[in-house]
């Protein structure tokens, strides 16, 4: 059974939208939002997937079988699935049967992960693209929790990966440059995205962040979902 984020109306957070971030921005996709995370980012916009009273977890989590989830996903008629969270790699064993089933039906997969947990080989074979979102000092997580050298190196070696860093201020940009040099991450694999859940702040930060991306040859990503709908769930 997979632990899925439960929406306010009690339904699982499985929805059809467009990818709002990263290399596939703008592509129609079905999203599957899993619960639980091994980090606790101060600016996280999905805290409801991991920050809740343990004795009342059923209000925030819905447990579903792979078959039940597959039926909902297939009902949208879109063959790109984005698995997000929370941190999906915490449930990679449970996720495997769902992905195998959908792959046989012609699905492509993207995984959104914080890059602190190594994926097993069976998962790696199934995933078409890895959206690695390593956390910087601005996240409030201890460096020993958010920076796993073996994970940086593993994901950097995958051709199907990009590193998406959330940037709050210009000092974060220097931290990204340090990490890129430390792990030999090429500029074309690095995506910078402004930290914002408000349209106006998003646009303000985007203007100076674009210039920093240009200076190093990094990719830039806005957050389409914030621009289009604001800070809302299930869209």
Image (spheres, helix red, strand yellow):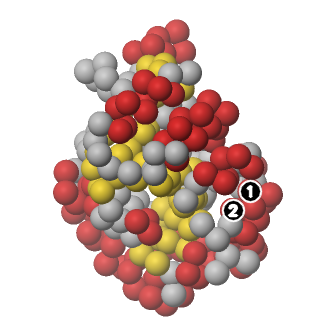
Task: Residue 197 in the image: state x and y as whole percent.
Answer: 31, 52
In this picture, residue 171 sits left or right of residue 227:
right
Provide the residue designation for mark 2.
Answer: 155
Label 2 near label 1: C-beta < 8 Å? yes
Residue at horizontal 42%, vertical 75%?
Answer: 220
Task: Residue 204 in the image: state x and y as whole percent.
Answer: 28, 71
Residue at horizontal 47%, vertical 26%?
Answer: 67
Task: Residue 157 in the image: state x and y as whole percent.
Answer: 73, 69
Residue at horizontal 29%, vertical 45%?
Answer: 77
Give the crowd class for mark 1: few <14, some 14-19, many >=20 residues within 10 Å: some
- The quarter of the picture where the N terminus appears is top right
**Where is 109 relative to 233, above or below?**
below
In this picture, residue 22 sits left or right of residue 163:
left
Q: CA distance from mark 1 to mark 2?
A: 6 Å
> Where residue 151 is drawn, which disc sits there?
1
- The quarter of the picture where the C terminus appears is top left
**Where is 138 relative to 1, above or below?**
below
In the foreground, 157 or 214: 157
In this picture, residue 31 sits left or right of residue 121:
left
> Where residue 204 is drawn, which disc sits there?
none
Q: Residue furthest top?
A: 55
Q: Residue furthest bottom?
A: 215
């Amino acid at each position: 059974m997979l632990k899925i984020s439960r929406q306010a109306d009690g339904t699982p957070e499985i929805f059809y939208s467009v990818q709002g971030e990263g290399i596939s921005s703008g592509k129609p996709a079905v999203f599957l939002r899993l619960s639980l995370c091994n980090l606790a980012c101060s600016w996280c916009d999905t805290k409801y997937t991991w920050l809740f009273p343990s004795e009342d977890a059923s209000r925030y989590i819905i447990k579903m079988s792979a078959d039940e989830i597959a039926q909902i996903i297939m009902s949208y008629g879109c063959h790109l699935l984005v698995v997000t969270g929370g941190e999906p790699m915490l449930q990679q064993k449970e996720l495997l049967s769902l992905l195998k089933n959908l792959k046989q039906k012609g699905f492509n997969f993207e995984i959104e992960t914080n890059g602190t947990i190594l994926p097993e080989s069976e998962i790696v074979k199934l995933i078409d693209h890895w959206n690695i979102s390593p956390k910087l000092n601005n996240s409030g997580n201890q460096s020993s929790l958010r920076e796993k050298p073996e994970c940086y190196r593993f994901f950097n070696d995958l051709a199907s990966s990009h590193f998406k860093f959330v940037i709050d201020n210009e000092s974060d940009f220097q931290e990204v440059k340090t990490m890129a040099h430390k792990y030999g991450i090429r500029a074309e694999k690095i995506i910078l995205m402004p930290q914002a859940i408000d349209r106006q702040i998003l646009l303000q930060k985007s203007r100076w962040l674009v210039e920093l991306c240009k200076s190093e040859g990094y990719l830039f990503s806005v957050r389409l979902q914030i621009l289009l709908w604001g800070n809302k769930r299930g869209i």
